[in-house]
Image (spheres, helix red, strand yellow):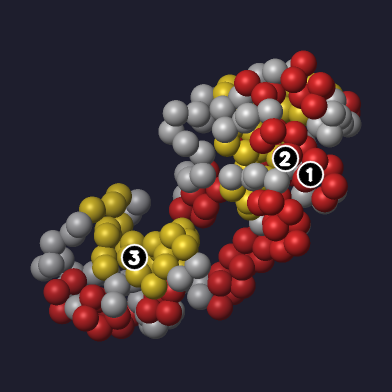
Amino acid sequence: MNLSSLSFFRSLRQDNKHFAVIGLGRFGRAVCATLHQMGYEVMGVDSDDKRVAQALTDNIAVRAVQLDSTEPASLREAGIFEMDTVIVAIGNYVEESVITTLNLKEAGVSHVVAKASSQIHEKLLRKVGADHVVFPEHEMGCTLARTLTRPNILERFELDPDNSIVEVLVPEEFHGKTIAELKLRSNYGLNLLAVSQDGRFEINPTAGRPLQKGSVMVVIGCNKNIDRLPI
């Protein structure tokens, strides 16, 4: 799993074992498939029986059911209220998304993650109790913009709106210089976590290690300081 994947999956608690994903569009299918591949028990849910059948055919969930998630009785009968975490992946239908989230929280589901399509949608989801709200399209747009303008940054994990951990290619200006000589903390306000060469990471590398152009370093710090690194 790369750093960008963590922006969603960090919200899933370690003790969670049973998941339901409501809405089997592109986002919901991706979440289903990833959790299933990681060895978790996942139920897929959608109002479209064709999507449900496809999920079973593609083996991205241990169980898939067709139901109307705005009906509490249907959710209860399917056993969804018993799940550790439910992901509401109905981003394009605001009313259905909000009602589904409300149904889950009122029934006592401890952890509900919901996909939002706008800031107003996010506010509504939080009002009805969503524990975590994600903006996949917005996050992908931000990632694309950063990739185009900062191609040396390979991966970014946002800790909060102002701070990140990034994998960045060692710039030419750093080639041959030791970590001690670079003084990343005093010159850039960044802390070096690891250095990678040929796909193998060295955690907390020694100060005397020289960096090589084309290798990868992992640093943590505020976004403004990360953007000061030479391209």
Q: Nearer the viewer, mark 3 or mark 2?
A: 2
Q: Is residue 208 above or below residue 100?
A: below
Residue located beneath label 1 in the image: 97
| Mark number, residue 220 | 3
Q: CA distance from mark 1 to mark 3?
A: 35 Å
For the residue marked with disc 1, what is the amino acid?
Ser
Q: Is residue 168 visible?
A: yes
The quarter holding residue 32 reads: top right
Question: Helix, strand, or loop for circle 3?
Answer: strand
Q: Residue at x 62, y 61 (%)?
A: 139
Question: Helix, strand, or loop for circle 1?
Answer: helix
Nearer to us in this view, 100 or 59: 100
Q: Is residue 160 above or below residue 77?
A: below
Nearer to us in this view, 122 or 201: 122
Chain-order first, disc 1 or disc 3: 1
The percent coordinates of residue 67 (x first, y second) are 85, 25
Residue located beneath label 2 in the image: 101
The percent coordinates of residue 82 (x first, y second) are 63, 21
Q: Residues within 10 Å of mark 3 (few under 14, many from 20)?
A: many
Asked if disc 1 and disc 2 are in contact, CB closer than 8 Å, the reply is yes
For the residue marked with disc 2, what is the amino acid?
Thr
Q: Residues within 10 Å of mark 1 (few under 14, many from 20)?
A: many
Q: Residue at x 38, y 79 (%)?
A: 225
Question: Helix, strand, or loop for circle 2?
Answer: helix
The quarter holding residue 167 reads: bottom left
The percent coordinates of residue 148 (x first, y second) are 59, 74
Chain-order first, disc 3 or disc 2: 2
| Mark number, residue 192 | none
